[in-house]
Amino acid sequence: MDKWKTAQEWEAKWHGNCINSFHEEQKQLVYAEKMGLVRTPTPKTPFSFDLKDKSILDIGSGPYSLLLKCVNFKNSFVTDPLMNKFPQWTKERYKEAGLFPMSIAGEDLLKHKVDKIFDEVWIYNVLEHVRDPKKIIKNARKLGKVIRIFEWLETPFHVGHPQTLTQKDLDKWLGGEGKVEIINREGTKGKCYYGVFKGDHYE
């Protein structure tokens, strides 16, 4: 079994029944801030983001995408190679929220005829887990007008994290310069890379 398949098995066990997701969702709020998303609080919740009728592709969304905290999006997709391994209720929740869940690895998006152009492509805490981070960013650039990204840098190899990312590589693949920072807040700890970049269809 290759490292990626082993990592996927580890990841599926990590999420388990997906019921207590607070810690992961707490970290997402930090990712969102660093990716340039601005909260639009409502009387119901302070954790809401108004996407102003944009279409979003969330690559590697897991069972609880940041899009579940968003309003006013259209024709948006959540993709993860483990989507069919997550409990059925997680997929039903995506559908109820108006999202399209797809069990696809980020490297294979174009093979599966995901040929729509999205206003934004989101990649956050994903690229450590994949087969080919360079290809995923290449696909993101082809599919989006804008790419928002948050990733961890220089992490040691782990059974669930077969990739180690560097600022140099990410800058090269994204065609720009991301921000690098060491953070330790709301459950997030480490050296991170983030930014907003132009996709191939930037207007």
Image (cartoon, rainbow, N blue to C red):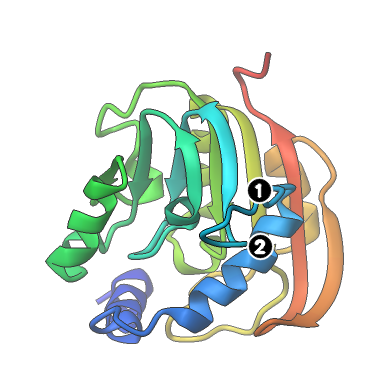
Q: What residue type is disc 1 on?
A: Thr
Residue at 26% of width from left, 84% of height from top? 16
* Image coords of residue 21 (percent x, y): 41, 79
- Gap in angstroms between the C-alphas marked 2 and 1: 16 Å
- Image-based side of 129 in relation to 199, left or right: left
**Nearest to the observer: residue 73 or residue 77:** 73
**Most extreme residue toward the left, as rendered?**
88
Q: Residue 115, how many percent across, how many down?
A: 35, 22
The residue singled out by tag 1 in the image is: 40
From the viewer's perspective, is the residue at label 2 or at label 1 nearer? 1
Please tell me which residue is depicted at 63% across the width and 65% down the height of the picture: 29
Q: Residue furthest front?
A: 43
Q: Amino acid at mark 2?
A: Tyr
> Disc 1 on helix, strand or loop?
loop
In the rendered image, the residue lying farthest to the top is 203
Numbered circles on residues, count: 2
Q: Residue at x 68, y 13 (%)?
A: 203
133 to 99, vertically: above or below: below
Instruction: Pick the residue in front: 102 or 95.
Output: 95
Element under disc 2: helix
Q: Residue at x 36, y 85 (%)?
A: 20
Q: Is residue 169 above or below residue 57?
A: below
Q: Is residue 152 left or right of residue 161?
A: right
In the picture, residue 201 is in which quadrant?
top right
User: Please, is residue 72 above or below residue 29 in the view?
Assistant: above
Q: Indicate the position of residue 2 as horizontal and vertical percent values.
A: 31, 73
Judging by the rendered image, the residue that carries numbered circle 2 is 31
Quarter of the image containing the N terminus? bottom left
- x, y (%) of residue 96? 24, 48
